[in-house]
């Protein structure tokens, strides 16, 4: 029983972290690439652009490790990229023209959308059922009134009905949450596999 609870807590944390990292990747690449390209005429933007484009390997390694820790889905290790020879401009050009690099960047930025879905699903699948389970306690303590589909938690019978609904929702939500976590893990595995093919 403890193992099942631990697994669902891990899934909940994974969904929340997916939202946080997706938001970070989206902002990082949007600001970094825009700033690097716009400032490249002053030569300040060229190193910024180079390091922003080069960061995909580090972020994919992070995603690979996080997926392995939280989902037990094995993701292949990324081979370390060698440092390109030549001037900084040639290295930026090589990174900029690398198709696999742009696919990885788009895949990481797409995690913002996946993260938004993860946040909504984490709330629906894990938090809402727990609040519904606690509705008799909330009714007895007169802490707050829960309303669901226009029905308010004003009587003990309704609060017991909400508790039953919460138990069913928790069982279904845990199954759906586990499925969503596996889908995100497979997405990460495909992203890493595509990047490692370069």
Image (cartoon, helix red, strand yellow):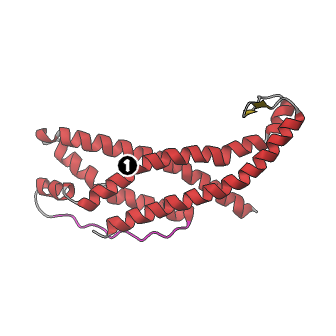
| Residue 53: percent from left, percent from top | 26, 53
Compared with 122, 99 (above or below) is below
**93 left or right, relative to 162:** left
Q: Quadrant of the C terminus?
A: bottom left
Callout 1: helix, strand or loop? Answer: helix
Q: Position of residue 111 (x, y in %)?
A: 43, 50
175 vs 36, left or right, is right
Q: Which image quarter holds the N terminus?
A: bottom right
Tell whether 184 sits left or right of 43: right
Determine if the magenta segment contains residue 76.
yes
Q: Is residue 72 left or right of residue 148?
A: left
Residue at 22%, 48% in the rendered image: 49
Can residue 1 be seen here? The reply is yes
Q: At 47% from the left edge and 49% from the top edge, which residue is drawn?
A: 114
Q: What residue span does the magenta drawing correspond to?
A: 72-84
**Relative to 86, is 124 above or below?**
above
Residue wearing tag 1: 109
| Residue 59 image offset from top left, x and y in percent | 38, 56
**Which residue occupies the foreground of this view, 51 or 182?**
182
């Amino acid at each position: 029983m403890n193992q099942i609870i631990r697994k669902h807590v891990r899934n909940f944390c994974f969904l929340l972290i997916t939202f946080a990292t997706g938001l970070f990747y989206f902002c990082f690449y949007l600001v970094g690439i825009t700033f690097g390209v716009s400032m490249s005429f002053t030569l300040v933007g060229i190193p910024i652009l180079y390091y922003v484009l080069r960061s995909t390997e580090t972020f994919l390694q992070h995603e690979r490790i996080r997926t392995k820790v939280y989902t037990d889905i094995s993701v292949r290790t990324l081979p370390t990229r060698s440092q390109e020879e030549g001037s900084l401009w040639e290295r930026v050009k090589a990174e900029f023209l690398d198709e696999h690099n742009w696919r990885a960047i788009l895949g990481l930025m797409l995690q913002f959308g996946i993260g938004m879905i993860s946040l909504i699903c984490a709330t629906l699948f894990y938090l809402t059922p727990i609040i519904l389970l606690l509705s008799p306690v909330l009714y007895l303590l007169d802490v707050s009134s829960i309303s669901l589909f226009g029905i308010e938690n004003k009587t003990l019978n309704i609060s017991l009905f909400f508790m039953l609904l919460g138990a069913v929702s928790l069982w279904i939500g845990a199954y759906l949450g586990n499925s969503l976590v596996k889908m995100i893990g497979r997405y990460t595995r495909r992203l890493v596999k595509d990047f490692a093919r370069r």
